[in-house]
Amino acid sequence: MSRSLPMRWSVGALKPSASPSVFRPLLGIALSQIGHHYLLSAHPHRQIRGIHNSRRPDHSKQQPFRRSQSRTAPDAVLESLRRQEFKRKVVVWSFWAINGLVFFAWIAAKAEAEHNIEEIKSQPRWQRATQLELTMISPKMKEMLEKWTSSRHNLEGGRYYTLLTAAVSHQDFFHLLFNMVTFNAFMTVALYSSIPLRTLAGLTVGSAVVGNLSGLADHERKGQVSHYGLGASTINMGLASAMACTQPFVTFAFFGVVPMKLWQLAIGFTALDMYMLDSKTSSTGHAAHLGGAVFGLVFYFARLRKFGGLVDIIRYYATRSRK
């Protein structure tokens, strides 16, 4: 999930003064480890393109008693699966490592700021710093806010790269855990759909930038110009939207029990973000989520439609209606 928080800190525990995220109850969601076992329930008219759509060899053209030829196709499929699994581990583990390093940097910054706050609290009242000044007394905290969050202040300072770096930044452990599990699930679908890494890089970067811009625009609309956003949910929503169009019938386990198709899961999260968009009690960046989801949808029609999915379904019903 993406977090939208005011740029101030409570003196006591140095935690964001915003209310808890409404998505906390959803942390129990167990997005199933897909791996090699996609539950692809393809549309009856035409199987959705993907690794399970590999054409079977035409055994009628093979010479009798040539077992090596009959094993060629299965061996090729297994080798393809091994390559895809290796690629998945490299991509997912690298993303986890980056997010983990940034998370530990936040921990160090908070520890330094809390130490400085304790020193300030021991001083006479007239010498104590105000809440707005608390971030300034911690150089590490100031650096993290300026380099790893998306905010109006950072854009005005020319730090446009924060639209991307904010998407790998998490202050809370459960926020980090939820986003990393979700990224693993959606990225696994993408990689096993044989989508090139360069294409996926464009999808993730675009989702992060558009999502964070959407979050900042929503802050301006609400007059929350001092708020900032962070979290990988913009990327996850872009992946979810694009993969829901590419492989809509992949099945996930909702809460580890309830089976749900990917298209149902994507629509459900999008509907929840739309409903909570103007909530006054939520600190979640719902506008950032929606921005990432919209980019993922546009990206599918621009770059991913050749992989089938929603386009095939639309064509099928369009052809059927003409008959």
Image (spheres, helix red, strand yellow):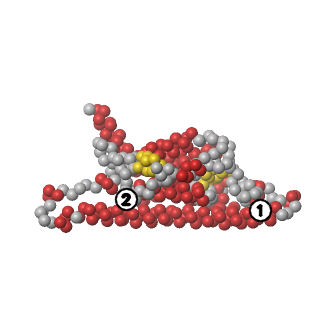
Q: Outermost residue, left direction?
A: 64
The picture places residue 130, in percent across and down from the top left corner, at 79, 56
Please identify the quarter of the rendering in which residue 190 is found: bottom left
Residue 36 has which mark?
2
Residue at 31%, 33% in the rendered image: 321
Neighbour tally class for label 2: few under 14, some 14-19, many 20 plus, Cα within 10 Å? some
| Residue pointed to by mark 1 | 117
Amino acid at pointer 2? His
The picture places residue 64, in percent across and down from the top left corner, at 12, 63
Query: Can you tell which of label 1 and label 2 is closer to the viewer?
Result: 2
For the C terminus, which image quadrant?
top left
Q: Outermost residue, front direction?
A: 257
Above or below: residue 308 compared with residue 101? above
Residue at 76%, 65% in the rendered image: 116
Residue at 68%, 49% in the rendered image: 18
In the displayed structure image, the side of residue 50 where residue 13 appears, left or right: right
First in sequence: mark 1 vs mark 2: 2
The residues bearing labels 1 and 2 have C-alpha atoms spaced at a distance of 51 Å
Residue 165 has which mark?
none
Amino acid at pointer 1? Ile
The picture places residue 181, in percent across and down from the top left corner, at 50, 57
